[in-house]
């Protein structure tokens, strides 16, 4: 299974120097697996700053008045404008690395799940968009947006965030 390959690659990478045991998430980070620059970059992807315009939240790094005005003229629904402006393509996050469709979907599913949890308090959810590897992404939209959410693709072997992290702690999980 392709997703099992991702987990196995991470397990191999997260082994202690002597290879005797797997490191937990905090042990891995503490053992030099994550440098400060990577930590802050990852934190900004997981919890990006937001701005609010006309009652709608946008990713601050993606918001531009001119672009917003252009999309507002093209699209009638402000939530569709929100979907477009907040879109983050998985290929952008991993520039220079080629990901399979399954890997792209797994990353998108995990990021959508994280964003839905992190931004629930302000009424936002993460949505997966796209079908082709280079086009797969995640966008952030209002929970009560009129348009139905994009269907979440089935990702072979993908499990919820808590089960994924548990699998790193217990390979039998």
Image (tube, rainbow, N blue to C red):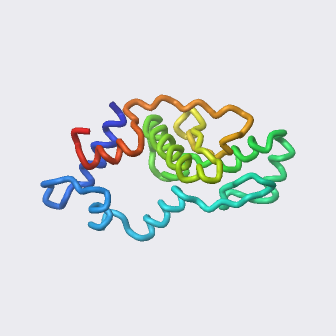
Q: Is residue 75 above or below residue 31?
A: above
User: Extreme right residue here?
Assistant: 73
Q: Hey, which quadrant is residue 23 in on the image?
A: bottom left
Q: Residue at x 83, y 49 (%)?
A: 70
Q: Residue at x 31, y 38 (%)?
A: 5
User: Extreme front residue here?
Assistant: 121
Image position, residue 85 (x, y; %):
70, 50
Which quadrant of the rendered structure holds the C terminus? top left
Image position, residue 83 (x, y; %):
69, 44
The residue lying toward the viewer, choosing from 103 and 58, is 58
User: Extreme bottom residue here?
Assistant: 36
Q: Is residue 24 above or below residue 139?
A: below
Q: Residue at x 75, y 43 (%)?
A: 79
Image position, residue 30 (x, y; %):
30, 67
Image position, residue 98 (x, y; %):
45, 45
Relative to 169, is 75 on the left or the right?
right
Which quadrant of the rendered structure holds the N terminus? top left
Relative to 151, is 67 on the left or the right?
right
Q: Residue at x 44, y 35 (%)?
A: 102
The number of numbered discs placed on residues in the rendered structure image is: 0
Relative to 35, is 148 on the left or the right?
right
């Amino acid at each position: 299974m392709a997703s099992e390959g991702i987990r196995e690659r991470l397990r191999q990478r997260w082994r202690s120097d002597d290879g005797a045991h797997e490191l937990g998430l905090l042990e891995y980070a503490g053992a030099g697996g994550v440098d400060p620059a990577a930590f802050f970059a990852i934190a900004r992807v997981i919890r990006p700053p937001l701005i609010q315009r006309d009652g709608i939240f946008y990713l601050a790094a993606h918001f531009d008045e001119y672009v917003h005005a252009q999309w507002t003229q093209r699209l009638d629904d402000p939530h569709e404008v929100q979907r477009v402006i907040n879109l983050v393509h998985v290929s952008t996050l991993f520039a220079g690395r080629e990901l399979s469709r399954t890997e792209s979907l797994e990353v998108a599913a995990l990021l959508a799940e994280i964003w839905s949890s992190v931004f629930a308090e302000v009424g936002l959810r993460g949505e997966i968009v796209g079908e082709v590897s280079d086009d797969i992404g995640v966008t952030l939209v209002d929970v009560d947006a009129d348009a139905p959410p994009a269907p979440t693709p089935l990702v072979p072997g993908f499990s919820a965030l808590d089960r994924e992290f548990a699998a790193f702690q217990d390979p039998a999980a």
